[in-house]
Amino acid sequence: MSEDVTGRGGGAAGADVIVVGGGVSGLTTAMVLAERGHRVRVWSAAPSSATTSAVAGALWWPYRIEPQDWVGDWSLASLRWYEELAARPRETGVRLVDGMHRGERLAALGPWAGQLDGVVETAEGLRCRLPLIDMPVHLEWLERRVRAAGGSVERRTIASFDEAAAEARTVVNCTGLGARELVPDSGVRPVRGQLVLVENPGIEEWFTEADPASSETTYFFPQPGRLVLGGTAGADDWDTVPDPRTAREIVARCARIRPEIARARVIGHRVGLRPARDAGVRIEAEPLPGGGRLVHNYGHGGAGVTVALGCAEAAAHLVG
């Protein structure tokens, strides 16, 4: 049973590509394919507002993602696109915002870092002006782009990719954590992220401090109408219920950087499960019974937004 939520009568019929997954990877891939002339349907078990992508703090930065040989190109392709979208922030949800990556050093990053404009290395870390994406707005904008190109977005839960293959010759797998069971791929695992939303006490710049060896991170991102505080990186933790003690610790860590955060009114709590994969991102095609093709685009870890367009273009290349 599916529900066409495109707002267009009959828009779901006659697709040659079905993209399974309605988060940022799925919608960006569907947009690229639809704008290249494919008839595309997106099948998503949940509305975009209920996906992991909607929870993301969404600062552009390659974080917790492999393989390094490809991540740089994917990230830079997405960066240039976001820089263009930032000219229309209310429409696209993308803004360019200044901030600090405390503890980062250019020499410790990949070759991609040499392509960044305006990065200043200080004794404290890296000062940068980077895309910061308001994900609920951006996801809605992506859906509109898909529809404008003739695609559709439907609520549909599947137990097998065969269900999609029965209705389209090409299926694109953008299911994130769902790939663990659907592929199946036991190397897919969650990295739990908990966030606290507070009223912004006047902070205009973002801040991050992350130790890859620790499950605790410290960051805050000024989004429209809220300040997003984080965070955690709990590997193999499937718990989607916010933990009150963890929330207090997040606020305390952020307040050590900006004391006014301690007095900010809490307006919400969020938990998202980053879809990590032991072997890194998988962008690969394989045949389906009956002569169809299954194209994989999953395993983006903590950088699904950062590589969204780059990976979408790579997957679209495999679709043909």
Image (cartoon, rainbow, N blue to C red):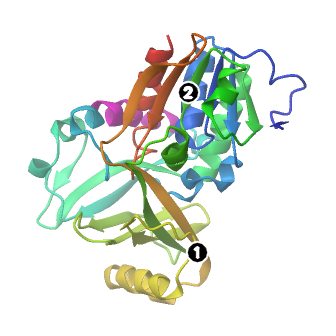
Indicate yes or no whether the magenta region holds residue 121: no
Of residues 40 and 291, the one nearer the viewer is 291
**Could one spot residue 57 in this view of the protein?**
no
Q: Circle 2 sits in a helix, a strand or a loop, which is it?
A: strand
* Secondary structure found at label 1: loop
Q: Residue at x 62, y 44 (%)?
A: 139
Q: Quadrant of residue 8?
A: top right
Q: Quadrant of the N terminus?
A: top right
Specify few, some or many for label 2: CA neighbours under 10 Å numbering under 14, 14-19, or 20 or more. many
Q: Tell me, for residue 172, which label it has, or none.
A: 2
Q: Is residue 217 left or right of residue 157?
A: left
Q: Earlier in the sequence, mark 2 or mark 1?
A: 2
Question: In whole angstroms, how far apart are the C-alphas of marks 2 and 1?
Answer: 30 Å
On screen, residue 273 above or below 261: above
Is 26 in front, or is 257?
26
Q: Is residue 135 above or below residue 284?
A: below
Question: Eyeballing the image, is 253 above or below 168?
Answer: below
Most extreme residue toward the right is 9
Task: Indicate whether residue 80 is drawn in magenta.
Answer: yes
- Residue 194 position, x and y percent, is 48, 71
Query: Which residue is under mark 1?
Result: 241
Q: In the rendered structure, which amino acid carries the disc numbered 2?
A: Val
Are circles 2 and 1 on residues that touch, CB within 8 Å? no
- Percent position (x, y) of residue 187? 37, 48
x, y (%) of residue 154?
76, 36
Residue 70 visible in this rendered orientation of the protein: yes
Magenta residues span 73-85
Residue at 72 percent across and 20 percent down: it is: 167
Residue depicted at x 63% and y 52%: 136
